[in-house]
């Protein structure tokens, strides 16, 4: 069983915007007005590795991110497209490795080549996030809000995702908080991490309505029995 880590009260506030992905499309809002910062939202996309679990479809010359596994577009192109117009291509940074950078750029020519952050060697998600955050700060200012996501996600309702990102960005800007978008599990999965929700930020807006709450615990890759218990208690992936 993995260790349960409690969010420190002195650390940046962690918040989860829950169930918004499962709800209907939310009302369109003016993100920049909500942020009140004069800066626009950016994105950092993690696109390292070739996806060895997809061999022989994915190879060093044809990495997973350029495969059309969900629809007719490569995964990386789908990721960039679903962010627009909330985050246009010129504000998308892609963290990747040198061996697949050319293949990725061919799949997303709308993203400037200078927006590809090429790691000297695989350093893991934490290092990629730190580099992306530093680069967003350098290019757009230290108060700029950005979303971090992986290149191989499949999203059935991209407009709902963008609405959820708008809500999350408003919370992050107002409270200087780290915000996670949570999805309600449909089954126990020991390979995923779980968020145990705590008190809601707004007592008048429930999670079912797309409301946000504080994260009480993070649980990394629990055993099957604990995963079942977490789901019963309303935990999120």
Image (tube, grey):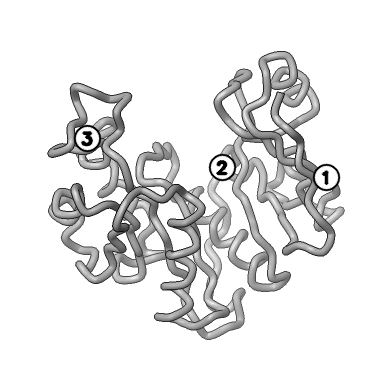
Give the Cα distance between marks 1 and 3: 38 Å
> The C terminus lies in which quarter of the figure?
top right
Q: Residue furthest top?
A: 225
Residue 223 placement: quadrant = top right
x and y, in percent, of residue 94 in the image: 33, 58
Regarding mark 3 in the picture, which secondary structure is present there? loop
Which residue is labeled 2 in the image? 21
| Neighbours of disc 1 within 10 Å: few (<14), some (14-19), many (20+) | some
In front here: 118 or 113? Answer: 118
Regarding mark 2 in the picture, which secondary structure is present there? loop
Looking at the rendered image, the disc whose residue lies closer to the viewer, 1 or 2, is 1
Residue 81 appears in the figure: no
Residue at left offset 71%, top offset 46%: 209
Q: Which mark is residue 51?
A: none
Residue at left offset 21%, top offset 54%: 98
| Neighbours of disc 2 within 10 Å: few (<14), some (14-19), many (20+) | many
Which residue is labeled 1 in the image? 198
Residue at left offset 61%, top offset 18%: 187
**In this rendering, is residue 236 above or below 171?**
above
Q: Which mark is residue 68?
A: 3
Residue 71 placement: quadrant = top left
- Residue 186 is left or right of residue 80, and the answer is right
**In this rendering, is residue 121 above or below 229?**
below
**In this rendering, is residue 84 above or below 73?**
below
Q: Could you tell which of marks 1 and 2 lies nearer the N-terminus? A: 2
Q: Check contact, mark 3 vs mark 2: CB within 8 A.
A: no
Q: Could you tell which of marks 1 and 3 lies nearer the N-terminus? A: 3
- Residue 199 is left or right of residue 142, and the answer is right
- Residue 111 is left or right of residue 79, and the answer is left
- Residue 127 is left or right of residue 119, and the answer is right
x and y, in percent, of residue 47 in the image: 33, 48
Regarding mark 1 in the picture, which secondary structure is present there? strand
């Amino acid at each position: 069983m993995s260790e349960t880590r409690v969010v420190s009260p002195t650390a940046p506030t962690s918040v989860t915007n829950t169930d918004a992905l499962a709800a209907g499309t939310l009302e369109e809002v003016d993100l920049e007005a909500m942020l009140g910062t004069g800066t626009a939202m950016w994105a950092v996309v993690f696109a390292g590795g070739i996806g060895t679990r997809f061999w022989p479809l994915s190879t060093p010359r044809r990495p997973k991110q350029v495969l059309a596994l969900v629809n007719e577009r490569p995964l990386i192109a789908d990721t960039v497209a679903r962010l627009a117009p909330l985050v246009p291509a010129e504000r998308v940074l892609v963290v990747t490795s040198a061996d697949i950078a050319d293949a990725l750029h061919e799949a997303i020519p709308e993203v400037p080549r200078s927006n590809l952050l090429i790691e000297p060697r695989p350093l893991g998600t934490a290092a990629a996030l730190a580099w992306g955050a530093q680069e967003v700060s350098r290019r757009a200012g230290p108060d700029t809000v950005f979303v971090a996501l992986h290149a191989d996600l499949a999203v059935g309702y991209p407009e709902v995702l963008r609405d959820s990102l708008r809500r999350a960005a408003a919370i992050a800007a107002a409270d200087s908080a780290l915000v996670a978008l949570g999805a309600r599990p449909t089954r126990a999965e020991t390979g995923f991490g779980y968020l145990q929700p705590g008190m809601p930020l707004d007592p008048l807006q429930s999670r079912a309505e797309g409301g946000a709450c504080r994260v009480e615990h993070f649980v990394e890759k629990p055993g099957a029995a604990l995963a079942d218990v977490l789901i019963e208690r309303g935990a999120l992936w």
